[in-house]
Amino acid sequence: MSDWSKVTRPIPIPNEWTKPFWEAARRGVLALQRCQACGHFQHPPYATCVSCMAIDLAFEPVSGKGAIYAYTIMYHAGDRRFAAAIPYASIIVELDDAPGALLAGNLLEASYTEAKVGRRVEVVFAPLNDDITLPQFRLAHDAK
Amino acid sequence: MWEHRCKVAVSGVGFSRVTRSAEIPLAAHALEAVKGAVEDSGLAMSDIDGLATYPELPATGHAVVDGITIVSVNCMMAMLKLPNLSWHVQVETVNIGGAVQQAVNALLAGVCRYAVVWRAMHNPRGTYQNLPGTYAQGASQFTAPYGFGGPGQGMAVAYTRWLERHHQNREKMATLAVTQRRHSHMNPHAYFYKVPLTREDYLNSRMVAYPFCLYDCDIPVQGAVAIVLTTADRARDLRPRPAYIAGYGQRLAFEVTGRIGSLSSYMEGGRSSSRLTWERSGFSPKDVDVAQIYDGFSASVIYGLESYGFCKEGEALDFIQDGRMELDGELPLNTFGGSLGTGRIHGLWHIIEGALQASGRAGERQVKDVNVSFVGASAPIVQGTTFIFVKEPY
């Protein structure tokens, strides 16, 4: 299992588009940007709905359950701050509630060899500091 | 078909020395390549009246210092002092293929007569990537905290999806790496010229970002390449046999910035660019005699082969087996060694090789009886451009 205890992660700087995402995460809620006109979820947040061109967008809670869409196992410490965790799995998750919106994360509480496309995962929240909590993922044993 | 097909041609080509990292200023590499291309055409520098490039840094995080880390049009203008200069451009939405296409358009519009396009790539001594510091801003706020930022990770995630959805095996990629390395042994300008690579080397090499091992990644280098483009009637009066541009295209899709891992973004980029190229030229994949497909990371070749229509989705790793990509195979591929063989100079070298094969100037590695020569000049995802060069105008 990757040892994350000695890893110093870059700290996200919320901006006007992304602030509601991080505010929700700090409360332990996964919230994604949704078009109020057509219902399309998108991530990362954007200025307009990339599905219907509407500009009425709001953040709505989602269940945090989904599947690994893609992943990579990092063996090379391109970023030295992550060297202690090598090899580690960086994953891309597609949520059941928000098809098409892809979230990055790490696979926590499991060996990196458990990362496979299609495997079920669920969100967990990992505080970085008083302001920022990272949504992360662990294996889930539910069926979709 | 495109009314302007075969009205512009690539004439001369030029290369600088390629070194592992910066030993001399990048501008000196660019100048060497541009002078080489002009000389290869049999032109004088004073004949050049158009300049185009894509000057972006190849790796993130380094300071932009013109002449040292990039070579802009302004830098080239200052060096060359061209007395007849009448047109120039720098592109941004697509890679160096976009600069070539703009030069084609300028020549067709009659606003210049002999255009030079160069691509100069910087590799500093020390760290290649300068990753975000303590904080992650913009789109990286959703990726950098999770350790995305090392080499090729954005490409690697799409590759796992491709491999596992299609029940494929990454070991088949050894054929691409080994064949391209063999091709580079016939290209004296390549970084890996005469440096052998065996299937065992590939299979035993260290993993970088699974599924990419070391030999799935092109080696960062410092160097430059350049071409001279001119109208077909002028090209016929120059020393080299012209490589006529029968058609080109660029990717017409873009997903939200910072969205990574999406395989469809590669496929839509490649499909849209190649569709324009097939329609404009009137050719289809089965007409192609030789192909250069961008290979900054090996998996780009898969997405290229599939999205351009050379094989079906999920089949590219099987397609390249059984000698099909060899010089005498059904689709000779990356005949100059690709970026995996030459070092990371981006897609202008693919364009150069496409032109050399069409004009019969590829020397020892020349494929027999080439008329239709295809180029996918960068990864189809965000920077894709495609070209067809022909020997015989039609």
Image: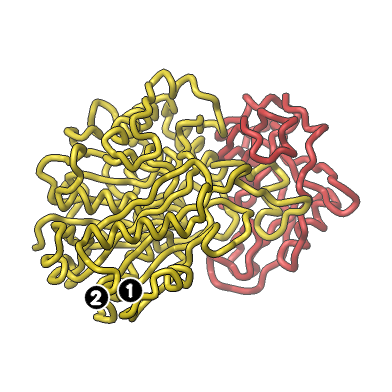
Chain colours: A red, B yellow
Q: Quadrant of residue B339?
A: top left
At horizontal 33% and vertical 38% (from top left) the residue drawn is B337
Type of amino acid under label 2: Arg
User: In the rendered image of this protein, does residue B129 appear above or below residue A139?
Assistant: below
Q: Residue furthest right?
A: A130
Q: Is residue B83 left or right of residue B332?
A: right
Q: Quadrant of residue B30?
A: bottom left
| Chain to which mark 2 belongs | B
Type of amino acid under label 1: Gly
Q: Considering the numbered disc 2 on the image, is that residue within a helix, a strand or a loop?
A: loop
Residue that carries the numbered disc 2 in the rendered image: B113
For the C terminus of chain B, the quadrant is bottom left
Give the total of numbered labels: 2
Q: Considering the numbered disc 1 on the image, is that residue within a helix, a strand or a loop?
A: strand
- Checking the image for residue B50, the label placed there is 1
Q: Position of residue B251 (x, y in %)?
A: 39, 60
At horizontal 39% and vertical 30% (from top left) the residue drawn is B173
Give the class, few, some or many, for how many residues have Cα within 10 Å of label 1's Cα (few <14, many ≥20): many
Give the class, few, some or many, for how many residues have Cα within 10 Å of label 2's Cα (few <14, many ≥20): many
Q: Is residue B131 left or right of residue B108?
A: right
Whether residue B318 appears in this view of the structure is no
| Chain to which mark 1 belongs | B
User: In the rendered image of this protein, does residue B198 appear above or below residue B227?
Assistant: above
User: In the rendered image of this protein, does residue B26 appear above or below residue B328?
Assistant: below
User: In the rendered image of this protein, does residue A44 appear above or below residue B145?
Assistant: below
Viewer-closest of A41 and B257: B257
At horizontal 74% and vertical 68% (from top left) the residue drawn is A16
Q: Is residue B359 left or right of residue B97?
A: left
Give the distance between the C-alpha atoms of the residues marked 2 and 1, in whole angstroms: 7 Å
Residues flagged by tags 2 and 1 on a common chain: yes
